Image (cartoon, rainbow, N blue to C red):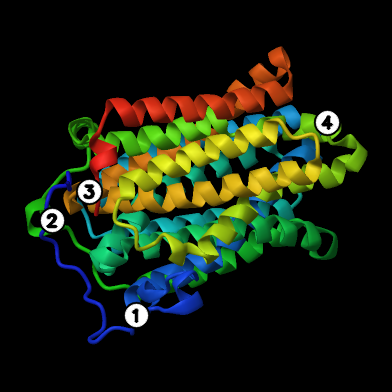
Amino acid sequence: MDTSESSTEPQTPAPAGGPPPRRGWRRWAMDTRPLRIPAYRRLWSSTVVTAVGSQLTAVAVPKQVYDITGSSAWVGYASLAGLLPLMVFALWGGAIADSMDRRKLLLVTNSGIALTSLLFWLQAAAGLGSVAALMVLLALQQAFWGLNAPARNASIARLVPAEELTAANALGSTVAQTGQVVGPLLAGALIPVIGLPELYLIDALALCVTVWAVYRLPPLPPLAAQAGRRAGLREIAEGFRYIALHKVLLLSFLADFVAMVLGMPRALFPQLAAETYAPYGEGLALGLLFAAIPIGAVLGGLFSGTFSRARRHGWMVIGAVVAWGVAVTGFGLSDSLWLAVAFLALAGVADMVSMVFRGAILLSAATDEMRGRMQGVFTVVVAGGPRLADVLHGTAGSAFGPRAAVAGGGLLVVAVMLVLAATVPALRRYRV
């Protein structure tokens, strides 16, 4: 039973004839059919470049803040300085993405992000040494990113056929997770060689490639029914009402919120590395814990052919969130570092499956006039959930011990997700 509303917007057709059916081992490998479409290939290739470049800045900012202050608390404050602008402008950016040409919005916002990266480089190269300046630039950059993300994600459904949305989400999510692994490793290797300011410059140059790729996209104006639409508080409120009226969308957001807030244990990684896994070497343990989930997600993406053609998207989300909770519980109960890393990698695979199908639901179950606002809310949930999890797990870890907090959080994820699936059938019944 498909609970989505029908959409009449034009979509880019697949090339005539199409490829032959995937057989043998290719059925297991990543589905790359969307890359045959030039417009999507340009959008995706720009993501490949920025996935690594953005992580260079993500490492450079906290490193510079710590070098200036010598305080981890200031590193945390700097992170929070970017959260509020991100949340506000992601919601507003979703409304804007539904009211103007998304290609133009991507050009403006990518140029703005590139400009802030250039300003990051200038202040570092000049030796300004001002945490306040860093926090202002970070807030500005996150505001541009909040405006950019909804338009970028909402554009996918206008570039690829509906039956390839899942594969397109798998391609994008895999690139993003790969950047989270490769970017920090590359930053750690480059800082001693070229210095911290140059990391910002590399990111700025990479963003110029992104601007060029977006410039070559076809126009993505609002459909006829959306022409003349404003982008104010009323339109943002309409987006939330739309979510409330479409339970499959509401549950897709709740599923991610439950998984991240109750089951993301990263705030406890330093304590677990220092206490539980200290015999393995604290530095090694900490690095492996932080890398395990992204590595698992990348592996899940590389073998996404195993699930990218599933039609029962709701059940895939439910199963992935439950699997995430089970894996996190196993991590919390693990004495062995290698077993813990294996459980976290399995959690990463489950997270990739959840990301792919939640993204596909948001693009297919919402009409084009609402896709920008749905992606704006999605951006807020993705950005805010892990930060709330840091507070919750840090508090619970201090009260009950880190392993009990992790295992308890994983069990709560399983219980809450199963209750939601049992009491609200919309997600169970949804299929593409």
Q: Residues within 10 Å of mark 4 (few under 14, many from 20)?
A: some
Q: Residues within 10 Å of mark 3 (few under 14, many from 20)?
A: many
Give whichever of 122, 290 is nearer the camera: 290
Helix, strand or loop status at disc 3: loop
What residue is shown with label 1? 21
Cα–Cα gap, marks 3 and 4: 44 Å
Question: In the rendered structure, are the residues bearing label 4 and label 2 in contact, judged by CB atoms less than 8 Å apart?
Answer: no
Give whichever of 305, 273 is nearer the camera: 305
Identify which amino acid the numbered label 4 is placed on. Answer: Thr
Cα–Cα gap, marks 1 and 4: 49 Å
**Above or below — where is 285 with respect to 167?**
above
Tag shown at residue 365: 3
Cα–Cα gap, marks 2 and 1: 27 Å
**Residue at figure coordinates x 44%, y 49% from the top left:** 355
**Above or below — where is 376 with respect to 100?**
above
Q: Position of residue 312 (x, y in %)?
A: 30, 51
**Residue at figure coordinates x 58%, y 63% from the top left:** 204
Which is more foreground, mark 1 or mark 3?
1
Q: Which circle's residue, 4 or 2, is located before the other in the chain?
A: 2
